[in-house]
Image (tube, rainbow, N blue to C red):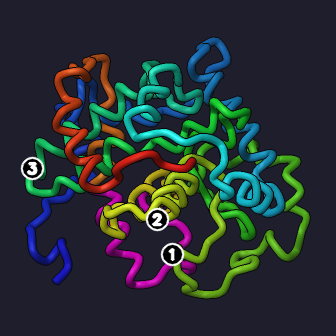
Amino acid sequence: MRLLQEHKIDFIDPSELLRPETSFADKCLSKFRDYTIDAADPLKERVRLTYRQMHLNQTVDFVKNRHKKWLKFNALRATVREALEKLNYLVDESDPDIDLPNIVHAFQAAERAREEFPQFDWLHLTALVHDLGKIMAFYDEPQWAVVGDTFPVGCAWSDSIVYRKHSFQGNPDADNPQYNSKYGMYWPQCGIDNLLMSWGHDEYMYQVLKHNKTKLPDIACKIIRFHSFYPWHTGGDYQHLATTEDEETKKWVLIFNRYDLYTKSEKVPDVDALWPYYQNLIDKYLPGVLEF
């Protein structure tokens, strides 16, 4: 029996995004993911320029090239803790919500998942490692190919992609009839698992988990693979490529987004105090030295 059938899950009411009260963070929920353009605001301009480079350069050929490079898994060997501690030195250039090292966000998300669903220890670890693929940024991968929202390459770009109106200008796939139509190189209801996603930390970490034979459930791996696919799970786009089975993945991604998005704040968790609990989960689901 599926987990969603075994345990009653209360979903976020979308209308909460319009209410002044806060449920998950130190600010109104509607203030998250603010991608308004303001050239005088250094943070907003950094985010816009990161997406501009992403949307200009993420093509089918580029993504296939990244697969060939990174899926050799020869960048480094490290434990989960060692990899997470590298994130102390990474600030996500695509994130309009917070300007803190990524390891802080990892523990914020994990602790929120633990608070809401203490019985799902796999979900706690999923939240802790969901951004671990950003380690690519330390190995000469530009942040526009590491961070930010993801989208399928090889078909028309959807309207709900952030900065969609202007940021894809100059991307060569726009002029390729194999890739610029509604279905592009796909077919109706092909399933999101069969999409070639823009290259970033989501796809990379999913592949790292599978390569290292994680004991996390498959739904945990799918959460990580698609957690930044906002045009699908939040924008409602690409349904012509999805299957009914993909709705199960979407449900869990939306649950996970409570922890990924709405826990971002300036409150820094006591990482040292939390390590023993999470090390036990690492030993259970993703032990030893991993190949990245």
On residue 236, the disc is: 2
Q: Of discs 2 and 3, which sits in the foreground?
A: 3
Q: Earlier in the sequence, mark 1 or mark 3?
A: 3
Q: Is residue 209 above or below residue 94?
A: below
Q: Of discs 1 and 3, which sits in the foreground?
A: 3
Percent across and percent down for residue 52 are 73, 37
Mark 1: amino acid: Gln
- Label 3, secondary structure: give it: loop
Percent across and percent down for residue 180 are 80, 69
Q: Which residues are magenta?
A: 233-255
10 Å crowding of disc 3: few (<14), some (14-19), many (20+): few
Mark 3: amino acid: Pro
Percent across and percent down for residue 166 are 75, 43
Residue at 20% in and 44% down: 280
- Label 2, secondary structure: give it: loop
Kindly identify which residue carries mark 3: 118
Mark 2: amino acid: Gly
